[in-house]
Image (cartoon, grey):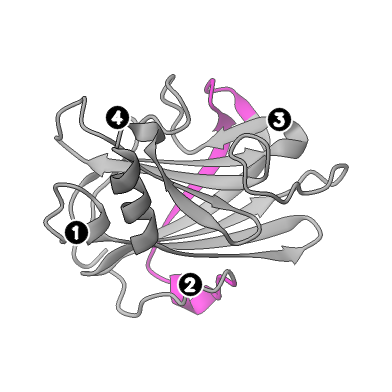
Amino acid sequence: LITTSPTIDGVLSPDEWKGTALLVLERNHRDEPAHPRSVAHVGFDEAALYIGMRNLINPHNALKIGRSWGKDDAIEVALRRRNSDPDSPIVVLRAFADGWSYGSNAGGMELEAARAAGRQCTYAATLAEPLRWLAEVRIPWTAIPGSDGKPCELQFNLTCNKTADKLFLCWKPTGRRSHGVGEEGIIIPKQGD
């Protein structure tokens, strides 16, 4: 539990991410080692889940800025309340290096429900230096079906699409699509953590 909510501005100030879990993304969607890696901070409070990512960029190729998943540099957050029916929809937020994001229906949600979940989220991104871009996300618990608007255990995954390397870098590759979630990646919000 974080005591002060991070400011979602794409900066990742060190003090605002104290007390958060650190996740390293260093495997591709086929569960093979991959580089350059990304690192994510994950924390929560009573209102929302927070994610801050540092995404390294291939020094030989430019960052591709745009708003097309699979073609432009972006991150994807996929989550579902743990112990949901395996066929329950997955909340998917796709967020791009230019600071734009949307709720995707790729995880089985109805299109308008997915867009509504995306509109509840706050997202910002910045190019921190020539070889790194930063992303920050706030996902309110109310955007997650079955959460009753409160912290809950989640099936969870993070993906970073790195176009220069034709790479979908994942926190927990599932053998399914990038937005696949299961018991491979679990977030358990606990008081005092």
* Within-10-Å neighbours for mark 1: few <14, some 14–19, many 20+: many
The residue furthest front is 112
The residue furthest left is 148
Q: Which residue is mark 3?
A: 166
State which tag comes first along the sequence, 3 or 1. 1
Report the residue at 41% width, 25% height from top.
174
Label pair 1/2, CB-CB below 8 angstroms:
no
x then y, percent, for residue 110: 29, 38
How far separated are the C-alphas under marks 3 and 4?
A: 24 Å
State which tag comes first along the sequence, 4 or 2. 2
State which tag comes first along the sequence, 1 or 2. 2
Q: Is residue 18 shown in magenta?
A: yes
Q: Secondary structure at mark 1?
A: loop
Q: Which residue is mark 4?
A: 182
Q: Which mark is residue 8?
A: 2
Q: Secondary structure at mark 4?
A: loop
How far separated are the C-alphas under marks 4 and 2?
A: 28 Å
Q: Nearer the viewer, residue 142 or 57?
A: 142
Read off the magenta span: 11-33
